[in-house]
Image (cartoon, grey):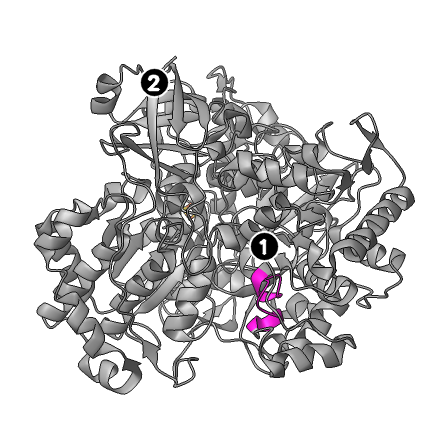
Amino acid sequence: MTGIEVDGTGVDVPEGASLLAAVRMAGIELPALCSDDRLSPVGSCRTCLVRADGRIAAACVTPAASGVHVETATEDLRQLRRDAVELIASALPPRALAADSRSELAQACRSLGIRPGAARGTGGRGGDESHPYVHLDRDLCIACGRCVRMCAEVQGTFALTLTGRGSDTVVAPGTGGPWAESDCVACGGCVDTCPTGAITEPGPGQGLTSANRPTAGLTRTTCGYCGVGCSLEVTTRDGEVSAVLPARDGPVNQGHACVKGRFAHGYLASPERLTRPLLRQRDGRLEPVSWDEALGHVARGLREAVDTGGSDAVAAISSARATNEENYLVQKFMRVVIGTNNVDNCSRLCHSPSAAGLTASFGLSGGTDSFDDVERSDCLLVVGANPVEAHPVVGARLLQRVLHGARLVVADPRAVGLALHADVHLRPRPGTNVALFHGLAHVLLAEGLIDEEFLRERATGLPELTELLADYPPQQVADITGVPAADLVAAARLYGRAQRPAIVYGLGVTEHLHGTDGVRALSNLAILRGAVGTNNGYGVNPLRGQNNVQGASDMGALPDLLPGYGKVTDPDPRSRAEAVWGVPVPHRSGLRIPDMFAAARAGDLRALWVIGEDVCATDPDANRVAQALNACPLVVCNELFLSETARHADIVLPVASWLEKDGTFVNFDRRFQRVRPAVPPPGEARTDFDVVRSLAAVMGVDLGCATPADALAECGRVAPVFAGLSHNRLDREGAIPWPCPDLGRPGEATLYADRFATPDGRAHLAAAPYLPPGEQPDDDYPLVLVTGRRWAHYNSGSMTRRGGNLELDPVDFLDIHPDDAIRYDVRDGTQVSVESRHGQARLTARVSEQTASGQVFCSFHFPASGVNSLTSDHADTVTSCPEYKVTAVRVAAG
Ligand code: FES
C-alpha cells in the first residue's frame, strides 16, 4: 500500500493506483469523463484536474506516488474542472443535459452548477438504430474513446473506432456501415461505459449504466445462462425487468457481461410463457387446470407407477438451470418420497466425464483452481472450447491475458475465436483427442519438460504412462489426428516451458465415446508439469456449460451420488443422509438419463418427471427420446414454455425462471453465489422449489426445508463439504467456493495445495490408450458433424429465440468448408439436407473456412431443424455422456 494525503486526510492506496482512485477512496467525487476503472487511462478530457504537490495534473493518469499531497477543493481547481466540462457540453445539443438525463455528463454538470442551457450544439450528425440492443446518437458523442477501449480492452472484439477529425470525431463501427452489420457482439460494454448517453440500450433501460443505476429497487443476482457465474444487477419498472447491468464488483465478470446475460431477458414477458398448469385430456389436447388438480394428478400417477412397477419405475431428470436448493429438493424427493436413486441431471450430457476424470486424477469433481489464477498464467492451453462464443466473459478474460503477453495454444478442430490469436492452433480430427494429448505428453517426457520432484513426491502412474507414451511419437500422432508433428512439438514446448501453464477445456473434450479418457489424458499434462496443486500453474479447469450444472451435481441430483459426492453404495454418506432425512436411502445406483429412456421404451419406466430440460431438443438421437416419452405412461414436465418435451408430456407445470427465484448457483470454478428474484413469476407459475415441496405434501410427506436457505443449510448437514455455506454468509461475503466445511473459514478456491483428495493423496496419471470414436466417415456418410453453441443463443434457444437475439442470429446455419461445398454442390445461403444413420435435419449452408474440410458444424439452438435427430446414441464408456462431437453425415443441396 502507498500512503498519500488528499485534502489533508491520509489515505492508503494499492500500489500502482492513480490519483483519481486515491481521491475516490477519500470519498471525493470528481468528474472523469474519459475514465473508467475497467480501462487504461488516456487523460484526454481534462475534467479530473487536481493539484499534486503543487502541480496541476489529470488525476486519472497520474500515479499516486508515496507521500504526495493532493488538493481537489480549491476554487481555482473547481473552476478548471467546471470549464473543461462546460466546454465539452457546449458542443452537444440541449437534450444532452435534459432534466431527466442520467448520464455522467449531465450529473457532472448538475454537480458543478452548469445549467442545461450550456448545451448549445446544433446536432444533425444523425444516429444508428439498426441494432436491437445498441443505439447510437452521434450528436451526443464526445469522442472520449471509452466505448472503443471497452470493446478492445475488456471485450477484445475491436469492433469500434473513432472516425472524423477535430470536433467532428465520433464513434463508429470499424467495418463502416450500420452497427447491426458490424463485428459487435453486443456485450453491452460500450453502453455501460458511455458517459453521455450517445450509446444506449433502447427501451426502458435506456440511459442506465452500472455507474448510474438506481440503488433502490435494484436486485443483485447471478446470471442464469452459461456457467461463468456473472454477477448482475437488475432494475425493474412496473413489475417487469427494465435492464440487466453487469455488477462492477462481480467476482468473475468484473463489470462485464455478454449478449445473453445483459440483454436476453425479453423471454420473461413473452406471451408464450406458461402461466397455468396443463393437463392432457382424453382427446389429446393439453388444457389448463388448477394447481390442485395438476398436483393431484401427478401424485396419483406416481403412486400408480410405484404400485405397478416398484419405486424404480419412477425417474426424474433434474435441472442444471434450477438452483442448488431446487436440485437438492428434487433428489431428496426421489430418495425420500419415491424411494429410488433414479435421478440425474444434464451434466450427464456434458461434463459427467469431467466429474469422473477429475475425480480419478485428483480426487474432487470440479476444476482445480480459481479462474482468477489464470491472470498469472503465461501459457494457456485451451482445448475443445469456444469460450468467445459459449462463455464470452471468460473468453474475453482469456483473450486479454493473451493480449498482455501469455502464449496461447488452441486445440480445436474449428478455427474458433481464440484460435485467431493462438501461437499454435492444433486441429485434430474429431474423436482423436486422447491421441493428441498423449502426443503432447510424449514430447514433454522426451524433452525433459516434466517436474520430476512433483512426480516423485505427489503423483503415481508414471511408469505405466511412460510405457504407453512410447506408442505416441509425434509422427504417429500426426497420422491419427491430422495435426502436423511440428505443430504438436511446438505446442508441447510452449506448455512445457511455461512458468505457469493453464489448461481450460470444454465439451470438445468430454462429449466423446472416450470422453473420460480424454479428461484424464489432458490432466496428465498438468501432472507431468507439476502444474496442479502447486504455485506452478493453473491446473485443469472445465468450462461448465449451463449456469448451475456444477451445482446440480454437487447437490446429488445423480443416480450414484448423494449431495457432496458421497456414493449411494458407501455406508458412511448414506447413513449421514438417512440421519438427516429420517428414512432409509436406497443402496443401489439409479438410472442414468439414457438408461431412463431405454427403460421407458422397454416398458419398465412408468413415470418420468423432467424438470427444466428440453430433452427432445437437446438429447441425442431425438427420435428415440420421443419414442421413450411416448412409451412412458406418465410424463410430467416443469417448463417456462411449451417446449418439444412439454408437447410430449401428460402434465405440464409452469415454473419460474432464474430472474424470478431465490437460491444459489455454483459456477464453473466452484463458487456458490446468490440468486435473487427481481420480478415475480407470471400468472400462476411457481418456483420448482415450491412445486417439489407441494407435490411431496400432496403425497403426504413433509420435505422440510421451508425456504431455500433452509435447504442449503440442510444440505450442509448431509454433505460436510458444504457445511460452511449459508445464504446469510453468501449475502455478506458474496462468492464462496467449495469445499467449504467450516462457517468460520473461507472456501478453497485453489485445490490440492497440500495433498490431492484421492485415497492415497496423490495425483493419478492415467495410461489409457487412444481408441477411435463411435462413428467414422465412410462412403455413405463422408462428413463428420460437430455440434456446439453460437454466440447469440443458448442451448435449445427457448429463451434466446424470444427477443432481440433472434434478430442477431436468426438462422440455423450449417458451416461447411468451401472444398466440400463444391464437392457436394452446396451454395452459401441455400437450404441443405443433412442426413446421418439416425435422422435428418434441414439447415442453411454457410460456406466458411472456420470448419475444416471433411467436417461440418451446426448448433442445436433451433429444435425445429432437427439437429439432434442426427446425433447418435454412442456415449462415453464410463459416464454415458453422448458423443455429440462426432456424427458421420452426408449433405445435399435442397
Ligand atoms: Fe481524467 Fe478524462 S477523466 S482526463
Observer able to see residue 758: yes
Query: Foreground residue, 613 or 489?
Result: 613
Q: Amino acid at mark 2?
A: Ala
Measure how far apart labels 1 and 2 are at the Cα level: 36 Å
Q: Of helix, strand and loop, which one carries label 2?
A: strand
Residue at image coords 22%, 44%:
427
Q: Which residue is mark 1?
A: 345
Crowding at dot 1, Cα within 10 Å, few <14 / some 14-19 / many 20+, comes out as many
1 vs 2, front mark: 2
Residue 93 image-quadrant placement: top right
Asked if the residue at tag 2 contacts the one at tag 1, i.e. Cβ–Cβ closer than 8 Å, the answer is: no
Left or right? Give the position of 788 relative to 97.
Answer: left
Residue type beneath disc 1 = Asn
Which residue does the image show at 23% across and 85% down from the upper left?
Answer: 456
Residue named by callout 2: 892
Magenta residues, dominant SS class? loop
Return the x and y of residue 199 as percentages of the image width and height. 51, 31
Give residue 372's position: percent from left, percent from top: 41, 64
Residue at the (31%, 48%) spot, across then down: 773
For the N terminus, which image quadrant? Answer: bottom left
Q: Position of residue 690 (x, y in %)?
A: 80, 54
Determine the image quadrant of residue 103: top right
* Label ID, residue 316: none
Query: What residue is shown at x 69% (from left), y 64% (from top)?
Result: 340
Is 234 included in the stretch rendered in magenta? no
Tell me if residue 100 can be seen. Answer: no
Q: Which residues are magenta?
A: 553-565
Is 560 inside the magenta-drawn segment? Answer: yes
Assess disc 2: are there few (<14), some (14-19) or many (≥20) residues with their C-alpha within 10 Å of its C-alpha: some
Of callouts 1 and 2, the N-terminal one: 1
Along the line of sight, the residue nearer the viewer: 667 or 143? 667
Nearest to the observer: residue 254 or residue 659: 659
